[in-house]
Amino acid sequence: MITGTRGPVRRRRRGQQLEAELLDTAWAELVDVGFARLTMESVAARAGTGIAVLYRRWANKDELVLAAFEHYRTSHPIDLPDTGSLRGDLLAALTGMGRTRAAFTIIAAAAGFAGLLADSGLTPAEVRDRIIGGEAPARRRMLYQRATDRGEIDLDRIPAAVLAMPFDLVRHDLLMELKPLKPARIRSIIDDLFMPLVHKHRAGSGGA
C-alpha cells in the first residue's frame, strides 16, 4: 500500500499475484465461516475487490473453493528432509504430513458434508484429485530415490502400491480421526507394515 498526501492508495494487483491473494482470501474465509456460509460476495468483500473479479476467474463458489484447496496445498508442501536413512525420512515425512494436513483434511471433510461434492458436478474421485493433487507421487519418488541412491532399496523392484501405502494410510487415518496421528501409529505404519514389505522386495530376497 502506497501513502500519499490524500491518504493510503491501494496498489493494483494483477495476474498471478492477484489470483494467489484471492485464493488466500478464499481459504481464510473457508476456515473462518465454512463452506456452507462462504459466498462469492463474502470473499470479494474480504479481499477488498469487486465480485466481477472473482467471476472472471471462477464460474461459481465450488470452483473457487476447489482452487483454494489446490492453492493452499501447493503453497504449503510437506517437507521431505534427508535424514540419512529411509526409515528416518519416512518418519519425518509422515509426521509432517500428519501435522500439516490435519486441519486441511478437517476443512475438506466439512466442505464435503456441506455440499461441495454434491454441488460441484464432479465425481468423488475428481473432487479427491482436485483436493489432493497429482504432485504427491513425484515427491514420494524423490524420497525413495534417495534411499535407492544410498543402496537401501531397489526402487524398480518395489510395487507402486507398496510405495504409496504409508502415505495412503496416513491420509486414511486423518480422514477418519480428523486429528494428527499419534507417533506410535506412524512408527507402526513404518516398522510393522512398510519396512517388512520393502525388505521382501530387496534384490536377492526372492521377492517378486
Image (spheres, rainbow, N blue to C red):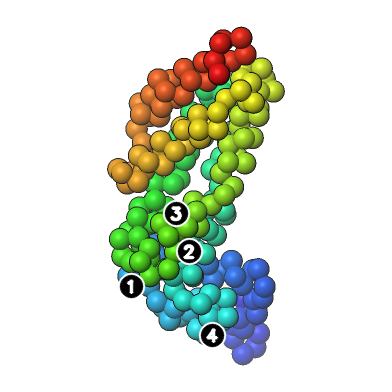
- Residue 92 visible? The answer is no
**Nearest to N terminus: mark 3 or mark 4:** 4
**Left or right: residue 137 compared with residue 180:** right
Q: Where is the C terminus found, in terms of image quarters?
A: top right
Report crowding for label 2: few under 14, some 14 to 19, many 20 or more residues within 10 A (C-alpha).
many
Pinpoint residue 97: horizontal percent, then vertical percent: 47, 40
Give the residue at x 61% y 23%. Answer: 157
| Residue 127, quarter of picture | bottom left
Element under disc 1: loop
Amino acid type at circle 2 is Leu
Element under disc 3: helix
**Left or right: residue 79 compared with residue 168:** right
User: Which residue bears the numbered disc 3?
Assistant: 125
User: Which residue bears the numbered disc 1?
Assistant: 37
Q: Where is the N terminus found, in terms of image quarters?
A: bottom right
Does residue 166 sit above or below 171 in this rendering? above
